[in-house]
Image (cartoon, rainbow, N blue to C red):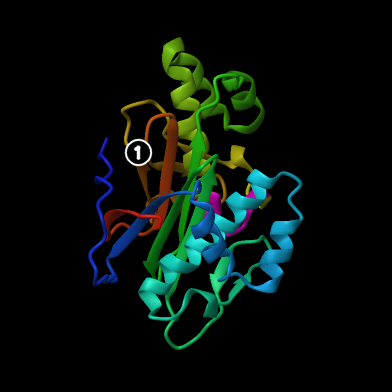
Amino acid sequence: MTPSPSWDSPPKTLTLPSNTVHVWRASLAVPASYLRTLEGTLTADECARAERFYFQEHRERFIAGRGLLRNILSRYLGREPGQLRFCYNSYGKPALIEEADAEGLRFNLSHSHDMALYAVTHDREIGIDIERFRPDVEAEKLAERFFSPREATVLRTLPEQLRKEGFFNCWTRKEAYIKAEGEGMAIPLSSFDVSLAPGEPAALLRSQKDPQEASRWSMQALDPGPGYAAALAVKGHDWELKCWQWASM
């Protein structure tokens, strides 16, 4: 497996060449003062959405996650975080509203518990997913229900101690792919195969809709930290990955 790069501190002057993908790791457990700063960058619609969360911790994670997204993207665009405007396709995939300086910038985000990942690139579809390991997950039952027959078979053949890891490898890679495609759960999880065995390179192996689909995509397993699995799906193969650690104030 190609190891994911280390999570480095970003340079003061940040550039994003056309053949590069940046992934940012950030904690959503931010100090209260910084959370208020992030909240101040949100639109009225985003603040209203935050208020609809019943639990305060979920409300705060949403504010932190959206505020950090704005701060990260603002570094590439040279604009204030609060000036950015988003639109969504019919399946909920976010994008920047087209402006002269935002043209071509693509991004995707995912969070699980207190950890968030943000992927940024130019002019290519991209998706990312992170999941925290849950010891009570019924991996084989869920695989039989949602995964392809091939994936469920591979999972069953793994040594028992590796099945949870294999399950979350599969889940994050499938989620990253459907998020990159931008059609969400309109793409049945059972309609395509990904690699999942621990130690095996992340890859889209087969798609029912098009025999050539797998050749158009590349995947990268990510190591966000102990207790988490994550994956990145990118259209094309001619790119390199850099991983940055966001430092909360």
At horizontal 24% and vertical 72% (from top left) the residue drawn is 13
Q: The N terminus lies in which quarter of the figure?
A: top left
The residue positioned farthest toward the top in the image shown: 160
At horizontal 76% and vertical 46% (from top left) the residue drawn is 54
User: Residue 89: x and y, percent?
Assistant: 64, 68
User: Residue 219: x and y, percent?
Assistant: 37, 47
At horizontal 73% and vertical 50% (from top left) the residue drawn is 53
The residue pinned by badge 1 equals 223
State the SS at label 1: loop
Residue type pointed to by label 1 = Asp
Residue range highlighted in magenta: 177-185
User: Residue 9: x and y, percent?
Assistant: 25, 55
The number of numbered badges drawn on the structure is 1
Left or right for 23, reference 193: left
Left or right for 224, reference 172: left
Q: Quadrant of residue 147?
A: top right
Q: Return the residue nearer the eye: 167 or 247.
A: 247
Left or right for 198, reference 88: left
Location of residue 168 with respect to 74 vertically, above or below = above
Residue 184 belongs to the span the image colors magenta = yes
Left or right for 77, reference 30: left
User: Residue 146: x and y, percent?
Assistant: 63, 32
Q: Is residue 211 visible?
A: no
At horizontal 35% and vertical 55% (from top left) the residue drawn is 247
Q: The C terminus lies in which quarter of the figure?
A: bottom left
Location of residue 230 with respect to 140 vertically, above or below = below
Q: Return the residue nearer the eye: 136 or 139.
A: 136
The residue positioned farthest toward the bottom in the image shown: 100
Location of residue 97 with respect to 106 vertically, above or below = below
Q: Give neighbour class at mark 1: few <14, some 14-19, many 20+ (Cα, 10 Å).
A: some
* Helix, strand or loop: magenta stretch: helix
